Image (cartoon, rainbow, N blue to C red):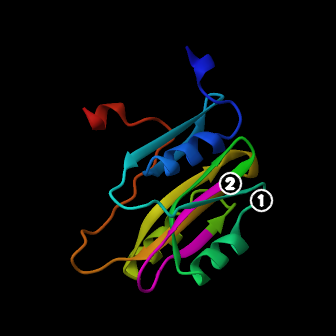
Amino acid sequence: SLDAFPKTFPIKIIKKCWKDSYKITSVEYCNGIWVVLSEASKDSVKQTVVLKPNLPTDELRKTWREGRKVTFLTYGKGRWVVISEPVNGPVGQSFFASNNGFPLTKIKEFYSQKKRIHSIVYAEEEDTWALILEPRSDRQPQQRVHYSKDFPEKQLR
């Protein structure tokens, strides 16, 4: 039953995962429920979560200044969710947001600058696309982006 799933942001579930040494790999809101994915970690989990009603530009910059990388960015039920963790060395991530439709031209520009998309999120209530970008090393495969108004069921078969 869907009644077992949280309808409010699942901060208690996330904190329990961290306490049990599980790293949060995804948090999504869809169809009235929050879903949390986590995986066991050999090390202690040092993730943090930030919830903001508006685009969290300042929080992202602060996260990077503190030597933390964004594990993922998502949007649901009127709030932005940023989960981050500390890294050794430079973070290298950057952020782009647009409310002028799907940012395909900018994405192609980022690819030409040897960047890759770490996260891409659409906030329907704000009509905003947000991207977390990372440098792409020569050892990483080239990324491609595909988009469509229809789910590409035939292409996935």
Q: Nearer the viewer, residue 152 or 64?
A: 64
73 is higher (above) or lower (below) than 157:
below
25 is higher (above) or lower (below) than 154:
below
Q: Residue at x 58, y 18 (%)?
A: 2
Bounds of the magenta segment: 81-96
**Label 1: few (<14), some or many (≥20) within 10 Å?**
few
For marks 1 and 2, the one nearer the N-term is: 1
- Answer whether residue 24 is magenta in the image: no
Q: Secondary structure at mark 1?
A: loop
Q: Where in the figure is residue 17, as x and y percent of width and height?
A: 50, 45
- Answer whether residue 93 is magenta in the image: yes
Q: Which residue is mark 1?
A: 54
51 is higher (above) or lower (below) than 68:
above
Residue that extends furthest to the right in the rendered view of this protein:
53
Q: Which quadrant of the figure contains the N terminus?
A: top right
Q: Which quadrant of the figure contains the C terminus?
A: top left
Q: Which mark is residue 112?
A: none
User: Horizontally, is 156 left or right of 115 in the view?
Assistant: left
Residue that extends furthest to the top in the rendered view of this protein:
1
Q: Are marks 1 and 2 in contact (CB under 8 Å)?
A: yes
Q: Residue at x 43, y 45 (%)?
A: 38
Q: Residue at x 64, y 67 (%)?
A: 97
Q: Secondary structure at mark 2?
A: strand
Q: Residue at x 46, y 77 (%)?
A: 109
Spatial CA distance of label 1 from label 2 is 7 Å
**Label 2: few (<14), some or many (≥20) within 10 Å?**
some
Amino acid at pointer 2: Trp
- Displayed quadrant of residue 5: top right
Residue that extends furthest to the left in the rendered view of this protein:
139
Q: Which residue is mark 2?
A: 80
Amino acid at pointer 1: Asn
User: Horizontally, is 111 left or right of 63 in the view?
Assistant: left
